[in-house]
Amino acid sequence: MKKLLLFIVWMCFNLLSLHAQRFNKSIPSTTKIYNEEGKVQMLIAYNPACSCKTYSEFYSDGKLYAKRMFKLTDKGEVVDGEDVTYLRDGSIKIYKLWQDALPVGRFYFNHDNGNLEHEEFYEGRYKTGTWKYFDEFGKLLREKVYEPNKTLWNSKKDDAVYKYYQNGTVARTEKLTAGTQKIDGKKVAVPGSVAVTTTDGKKLYELKCKTCHAFDANGYGPSLTSFSKNRSKEWLVKWITDAQKLVDIGDADALELYKKWNNKRHPSQSLLTRQQVQAIIGYLKL
């Protein structure tokens, strides 16, 4: 509810601010938005020299949480410039750079301990280069290698090679391209994926889960020890199949996991059949 109220206040201010600036675009201005405790939660600074705004958000203790830049156009505001999220100690959590609402160059995301979590690269309107993913101790877990000028920056379709690492060496490689395949006897469109037909729980775990989840230690994702505690098999089926859907509908357990693991999206396994998902659960004895 607090976030909703803040969003409404921000929208109202934004509309009024844009209206006012049409009449006087030469005067710099700073606006503060306060939380319920009377502390500054957001600061909005308008700079006429670049016709841009900087939005700064703060933690409850006053430390900087995020800073984002927007350019004013006839159609409204578009993200343009640095987009940075900070940890409480002032180090960078997420760094992005935009130009006219398009990503530019290298984006990077850090673990809470400051180590690199993953990096992304963009050129023009496309994903490009080799994206690398690491655990909190710096161990390389996987890579996405994109073909130039193939995958739009905001597309769900990947023209890329996925490489999964174990102990510093490539354990498995997948080539992802768009196309169609048969799932449960039906032909369906596949936005960048490969067919998996086995119903062997161990093989499915090794193909789909092992890279991020170990039995007895946290890695890119949580360990599987006691993961089933207070969770039904039906919930586990939904989580494995499409965890983000549980997050989006506000499932309390899913939201708790999502926040605990730095808002990282769990890869969708919606192309697996229910039988395959149950085979994974059976093998893990969840």
Image (spheres, grey):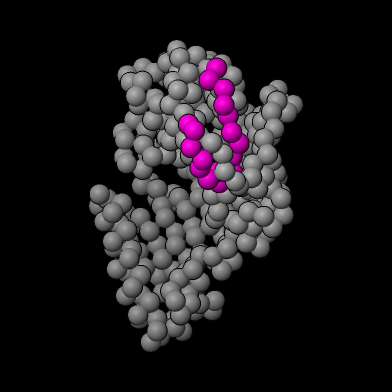
**Residue at image location 54% in from the left, 65% down from the top:** 101
In the displayed structure, 143 sits above or below 25; it is above
* Residue 195 magenta-highlighted: yes
In the displayed structure, 153 sits above or below 90; it is below
- The quarter of the picture where residue 161 lies is top right
Q: Residue furthest bottom?
A: 23
Q: How many marks?
A: 0
Q: Nearer the viewer, residue 241 or 70?
A: 241
Is there any visible trace of residue 92 in the rendered image? no
Q: Where is the C terminus found, in terms of image quarters?
A: top left
In the displayed structure, 143 sits above or below 49; it is above
Q: Nearer the viewer, residue 67 or 141?
A: 141
Q: Which span of residues is magenta-colored?
A: 184-200
Percent across and percent down for residue 38 are: 27, 55
* Residue 87 magenta-highlighted: no
In the displayed structure, 286 sits above or below 79; it is above
Is residue 280 left or right of 163 when viewed as pictured?
A: left
**Residue at image location 56% in from the left, 69% down from the top:** 100
**Residue at image location 57% in from the left, 26% down from the top:** 197
Percent across and percent down for residue 109 are: 57, 44
Q: Residue furthest right?
A: 169
Q: Residue furthest front?
A: 185
